[in-house]
Image (cartoon, rainbow, N blue to C red):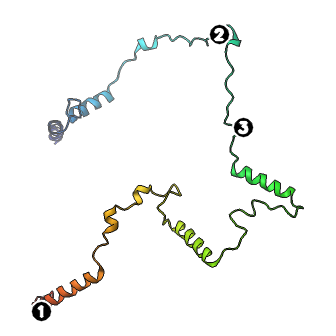
């Protein structure tokens, strides 16, 4: 029983080796498997030559004799003290709040925070409707002039080909008339989907 099982296992390895791909190694998969298992189970003696290698410490830094010969490194321009640095929204809000607190007793002072996004004049009903429709259109994503958000697809993906814009398809009335005509013709010819 045991020898038959070993023979069957050996035959399967041989057949697998004949049939399988070589994966660029020039050996069948069975041969590669046996070799890999042999390498995994093989004991090697320690390599004495590798232990006797003497590593030298790294050399010291090369420093010029005259320390004044080196130029000073450039100061980083990417810091908050740079006058060209863009003011962050948080800093701007804090600055405007402090400015509003300082002018709390001034009657003529109007804070930019209070008037943000508003106009001083009253809108007419038609202007309010237009503003509402524009805001709703932007909210629904029904704009194709430019990308407003990173989640918007590129403009080329939103444009229809010219022939697709011109082709509106067959009108529904024409389709309905055609269906009724075909149904009437099928009914008159005697063919029906009900076989009885």
Q: Which residue is mark 2?
A: 64
Whole-Å distance between the Cαs marked 3 and 2? Answer: 33 Å
Task: Classify 20 as above or below 66.
Answer: below
Q: Earlier in the sequence, mark 3 or mark 1?
A: 3
Q: Is 134 in front, or is 141?
A: 134
What crowding class fits label 3: few (fewer than 14 Cα within 10 Å), some (14-19), or many (20 or more)?
A: few
Residue 188's mark? 1
The residue located at (14%, 88%) in the rendering is: 185
What crowding class fits label 1: few (fewer than 14 Cα within 10 Å), some (14-19), or many (20 or more)?
A: few
Disc 1 or disc 2, which is closer to the eye? 1
Q: Quadrant of the N terminus?
A: top left
Q: Quadrant of residue 164?
A: bottom left
SS assignment at label 1: helix
Residue 25 location (% of width, % of height): 23, 30
Whole-Å distance between the Cαs marked 3 and 1? Answer: 90 Å
SS assignment at label 2: loop
Residue 160's mark? none
Q: Which residue is mark 3?
A: 82
Farthest top residue? Answer: 65
Disc 3 or disc 2, which is closer to the eye? 3
Residue 108 location (% of width, % of height): 85, 63
Q: Is 84 in front, or is 95?
A: 84
Instruction: Using residue 15 as the reference point, say whether residue 141 is left or right of it.
Output: right
């Amino acid at each position: 029983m045991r020898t038959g099982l070993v023979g069957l296992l050996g035959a399967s390895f041989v057949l697998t080796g004949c049939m399988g791909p070589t994966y660029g190694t020039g050996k069948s998969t069975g041969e590669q498997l046996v070799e890999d298992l042999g390498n995994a189970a093989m004991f090697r003696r320690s390599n004495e030559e590798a232990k006797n290698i003497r590593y030298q410490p790294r050399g010291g830094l090369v420093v010029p004799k005259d320390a004044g010969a080196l130029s000073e490194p450039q100061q980083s321009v990417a810091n908050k003290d740079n006058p060209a640095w863009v003011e962050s929204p948080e800093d701007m809000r804090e600055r405007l709040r402090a400015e509003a607190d300082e002018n709390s007793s001034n009657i003529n002072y109007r804070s930019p925070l209070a008037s943000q996004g508003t106009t001083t004049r009253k809108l007419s009903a038609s202007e309010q409707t237009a503003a509402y429709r524009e805001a709703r259109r932007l909210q629904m994503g029904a704009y194709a002039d430019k990308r407003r958000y990173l989640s918007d697809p590129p403009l080329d993906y939103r444009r229809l080909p010219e022939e697709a814009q011109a082709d509106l398809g067959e009108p529904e009335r024409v389709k309905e008339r055609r269906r009724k005509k075909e149904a009437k013709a099928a009914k008159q010819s005697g063919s029906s989907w009900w076989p009885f």
